[in-house]
Amino acid sequence: MNIVEHNRTAWNKESLAGGEWSMPVSADDILQAREGCWGVVLTPRKTVPKEWFGAINNQKVLGLAAAGGQQVPILSAAGAVVTSFDNSDEQLAKDLLVADREGLSIATVQGDMADLSDFENDQFDLIFHPVSNCFVPDINKVWKECFRVLKPGGRLLSGFMNPASYLFDYAKAEVSGKLTVEFSLPYSSIDAGEKDKQETIDKGEPIQFSHTLDSQIGGQLAAGFSINGFYEDEWTDEGSLLNPYMSTSMATLAVKPLSESGTANE
């Protein structure tokens, strides 16, 4: 099964349906960003601290699996030189829709987040990578590619799901009213059982993978990054049945060292 192709089709469907992460920002949002009043999210709700970005103006930014007409146009309006890289052509089209509407310059490239071979070594100052690596089976490839294309001192801002959120069958919980542990970790919607695999395929939903904290945080460290910032975030009670009990996502600020012996500025 070609997971990249399946998930591209699934996200194209989601984008065309106007899902939560496929609703382009308003003209007023862009105007405020141009005036210096802006905020973006790596996780469902919490705004990323401004200090994580450093000086955003004229910085070369890669929006990694971040398309949908939301975060990427805001960063462009704030002054960054942005390239949007995403598996879904419909999500990329949402970024271009806002760019054309608001006179922004956004480059778009379609591809797999685990393969950034379209880009040169040390090309970007910052990578903005919201919760999306749950759609690839091996995130260590993602971290290694991010490290390669970032300049020394460059920053990787990434969001990811708390792996514990994949323990539960939420469709069953909505019927029973109870959250019970159903799956072992790490989870994959094509390995959890033939029934779950077939339902994912039949519904045209993206194939998802949980990832251990060892691969999420330890993987960034193994790739060569230092972790300079961290926070957790919640969904809404309507968005996740697990929300009243624990944080469902988290974000990290990782920095590529200035040199083999030096360190990057925080």
Image (cartoon, grey):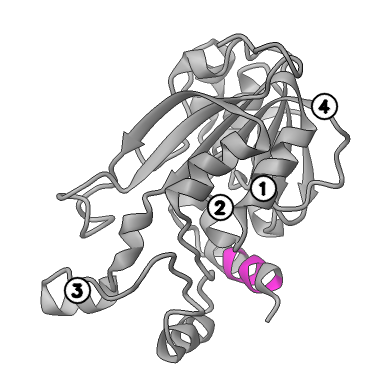
Q: Earlier in the sequence, mark 2 or mark 3?
A: 2
Tell me the kind of residue under disc 4: Asp
Q: Which of marks 1 and 3 is nearer the N terminus?
A: 1
Contact between marks 4 and 3 (CB within 8 A): the answer is no
Residue at the disc numbered 1: 142
Tell me the kind of residue under disc 1: Val
Give the secondary structure at mark 3. Answer: helix
Which residues, given as a range, are shown in magenta?
5-11
Residue at the disc numbered 3: 173
Contact between marks 1 and 3 (CB within 8 A): the answer is no
Q: How far apart are marks 4 and 2 (CA)?
A: 22 Å
Q: How far apart are marks 4 and 3 (CA)?
A: 46 Å
Q: Which of marks 4 and 2 is nearer the N terminus?
A: 4
**Residue 8 highlighted magenta (yes or no):** yes
Give the secondary structure at mark 4. Answer: loop
Residue at the disc numbered 4: 122
Q: Which residue is drawn at 36% across and 50% down?
A: 162
Magenta region, main secondary structure? helix
Tell me the kind of residue under disc 2: Asn
Residue found farthest to the left: 177
Locate residue 174, reporting x and y percent: 19, 73
Nearer to us of marks 4 and 3 is 4
Q: How crowded is mark 4: few (under 14 residues within 10 Å), some or many (20 or more)?
A: some
Residue at the disc numbered 2: 133
Q: Residue at x 71, y 58 (%)?
A: 89
Tell me the kind of residue under disc 3: Ala
Residue found farthest to the front: 261
Q: How far apart are marks 2 and 3 (CA)?
A: 25 Å
Q: Name the disc covering residue 29, or none.
A: none
Locate residue 185, reporting x and y percent: 39, 66
Q: Is 80 in front, or is 180?
A: 180
Q: Is residue 52 visible?
A: yes
